[in-house]
Image (spheres, grey):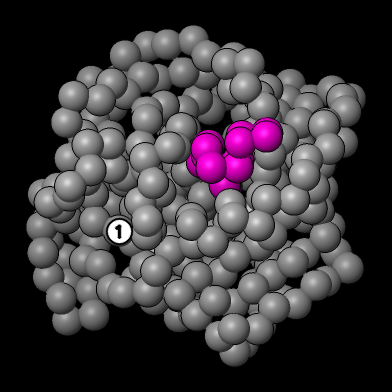
Amino acid sequence: MKSFSFTPALIVVAAACAPTRPASPAASPHEVPAAGPVPAATEQGNAHSVGHQSASYLLPEASEGRSQSPINIVTSRAVPAKHEVQFHYQTSKEHVSNLGHTIKVAYDAGSSLEFDGISYDLQQFHFHTPSEHLLDGVTYPMEMHLVHTEHGHPERFLVIGVLFKEGDPNGLLDTLLGDVPRRAGESVDVDAELDASSIFKPGEGYFHYAGSLTTPPYTEAVTWLVLDQVHDASAEQVEALNRIEGNNARHIQDQRARLIDHGH
């Protein structure tokens, strides 16, 4: 098992023991995206046609909620902050589901993180193509969500968002893509080890804000940590995911008076 934390210069790795979590069947379905194409934007923030639809992705979608996600994160307006973040991740067997509108990977019990003294259990991760969050008006080809639930309170979430641009192949995706069931609704369990901690880069920080799930019922009980470094995935990997799940990103929401802070 590995324990590590965000630091300004590196990720510290050391031996640790993570707490055992109870099963939380209600956690993962709420953060699995619903089907439906959403227009994406170019890196200049202009409208871009996807699936014969076109819209300005920089304009927030109307919503009845006051703290909805995703949002456009304007990095220059983020307030410096210091949070206590400690990861206690271990490896997991592959439990891969093709839900038609996303690929979901359920994670074995025992991996967790602590954020400002509160423990959250890693439940699953999945993907959105294109990205849901924007950084300074830029929509990226893909976003990964690592979904955690508060230990003892599965109705409260912490989600880590990881943005991807086209570049070098991603090792975690290399492991997964060959095992994804080809038919929607199918799942497989593979006797191979995944390491969710391998997704993190040395020295990266995160943008933190209070938001919601990005799929129905859009519950406003989510602590968001969107990593501040954009990761690489190959064009072939992004295209393979998009062929399975389509364009499944929710439109950005109004930030309103919410504070975004930048931590390490």
Height in image: 173 above or below 76?
Answer: below
Circle 1 SS class: loop
Q: Nearer the viewer, residue 20 or 93?
A: 20
Q: Nearer the viewer, residue 68 or 178?
A: 68
What residue is at 28 percent from the left and 21 percent from the top?
259
Instruction: Give residue 114's quadrant in the image.
Output: top right
Q: Where is residue 69 drawn, in percent x and y?
A: 31, 44
Q: In the drawing, does residue 24 fall left or right of residue 169?
A: right
Q: In the drawing, does residue 161 fall left or right of residue 115?
A: left
- Which residue position holds label 1? 250
Q: Where is residue 68 drawn, in percent x and y?
A: 28, 42
Q: Where is residue 214 drawn, in percent x and y?
A: 37, 53
What residue is at 39 percent from the left and 46 percent from the top?
219
Height in image: 132 above or below 9?
Answer: below
What residue is at 76 percent from the left and 31 percent from the top?
88
State whether residue 165 appears in this view: no
Q: How many marks?
A: 1
Residue span colored magenta: 146-159
Instruction: Give residue 77's quadrant in the image.
Output: top left
State whether residue 3 appears in this view: yes
What residue is at 56 percent from the left and 69 percent from the top?
103
